[in-house]
Amino acid sequence: MSPTEMTLHWAVEKWLAPTPATPAHVVRVRHTRRDRRCVCIEAVRPGGLLSIFLFRHDDGSWNVYPPAQARPAMSVWRTA
């Protein structure tokens, strides 16, 4: 599956598998620096409340882990 196919809806279906009897609800949306988004989604299960955080990555995909932060890098330039 390509990153552009990993939508928020797809991630919620994968991790929470909501049904009409046990729907999932977005309870919090957070925007961070550099327009990074994070949402908290909750679903009531027989064992109790289940909450997950989903993070939007630069390629548009949604995952349960935050995107990697850019770190300083060095490169070597070769001159002729």
Image (cartoon, rainbow, N blue to C red):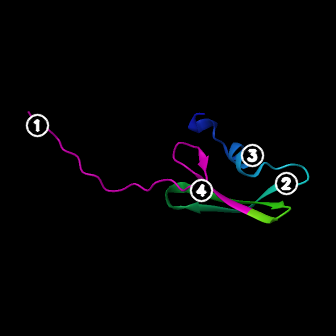
Magenta residue span:
51-80
Q: Earlier in the sequence, mark 4 or mark 1?
A: 4
On the image, the x and y values in percent for residue 5 come to 63, 36
SS under mark 3 = helix
- Marks 2/1 in contact by CB < 8 Å: the verdict is no
- Residue type marked 2: Pro
- Residue type marked 1: Thr
Mark toward the viewer: 1 or 3 = 3
Mark toward the viewer: 4 or 2 = 2
Residue pointed to by mark 4: 37
Q: Earlier in the sequence, mark 3 or mark 4?
A: 3
Residue pointed to by mark 3: 13
Residue beneath the point at 57% across and 43% down: 60
Residue beneath the point at 71% across and 45% down: 14
Q: Main secondary structure of the magenta part?
A: loop
- Residue type marked 4: Arg
What is the number of the mark on residue 23?
2
Q: Residue furthest right?
A: 21
Q: Is residue 11 magenta?
A: no
> How much space separates mark 4 and mark 2, taking CA atoms?
22 Å
Q: Earlier in the sequence, mark 2 or mark 1?
A: 2
Residue pointed to by mark 1: 79
Q: Is residue 73 magenta?
A: yes
Say if 10 sits above or below 74 in the image: above
On the image, the x and y values in percent for residue 17 come to 78, 48
- Residue type marked 3: Glu
Left/right placement of residue 38 relative to residue 43 reads left
Tell me if mark 4 has few (under 14), some (14-19) or many (20+) residues whose alpha carbon lies within 10 angstroms of its own: some
Q: Earlier in the sequence, mark 3 or mark 2?
A: 3
Q: Earlier in the sequence, mark 1 or mark 3?
A: 3
> How much space separates mark 1 and mark 3, taking CA atoms?
52 Å
